[in-house]
Image (spheres, rainbow, N blue to C red):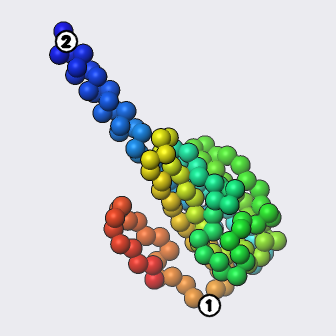
Amino acid sequence: MEGWRVLLMLMLMLLGQATEGVVDVTVVSKYPFFEELADTWLYCYFTGSIVGQNKYPFGLEVNTGAGTTFTRKRNSGSSSGGKHVKIWDESRDFRVGAFSCQVKTPDGSRTEKAITFKMKSLADVWPVAFTVTANVGEAVTLQ
């Protein structure tokens, strides 16, 4: 009988470790190429808890001339399994750039970030590929 208790305790400890250290985050960019006078959307789906970036669920990775603080010309809220933001067309050039969402495990031991890009449909330069899928630790080159 004692062996079963030890086995049960070991299984519970392993299960606890497996669920505590896992975090997943995906950023979806609705309309990554947008027209001059159009709203655009970002969605962040995640496990764990969201990490605020400048006191907001979404962050800016690069200053493309509009700063690194998220525009106030937006509507945001919760979606099933995540957060979303609608960036209004009045934001103009703020809608262009590298946007991110960051989450952490419930125990705070691990943090992950996902990044997506948005650009105007009439941009002079376009990427070779807009989406790249990679594994953890794999080097990625954006072209």
**Quarter of the figure with residue 56:** bottom right
- Seen in the image, is 37 located left or right of residue 135? right
Image: 20 above or below 65: above
Mark found first going from the N terminus, 2 or 1: 2
Q: Secondary structure at mark 1?
A: loop
Residue drawn where x is 64% and y is 86% of the image: 123
Image: 86 above or below 78: below
- Seen in the image, is 13 located left or right of residue 20? left
Residue drawn where x is 60% and y is 75% of the image: 62
Write down the residue under mark 2.
Answer: 2
Q: Position of residue 46 (x, y in %)?
A: 53, 48
Q: Secondary structure at mark 2?
A: helix
Residue 124 marker: 1
Tell me, yes or no, if residue 80 can be seen here: yes
- Seen in the image, is 13 located left or right of residue 120? left
Q: Quadrant of the C terminus?
A: bottom left
Q: Nearer the viewer, residue 17 or 114?
A: 17
Q: Position of residue 88 (x, y in %)?
A: 78, 66
Residue drawn where x is 51% and y is 61% of the image: 114
| Foreground tag (2 vs 1) | 2
Residue 10 marker: none
| Label 2 CA crowd tier, 10 Å (few <14, some 14–19, many 20+) | few
Q: Position of residue 54 (x, y in %)?
A: 68, 60
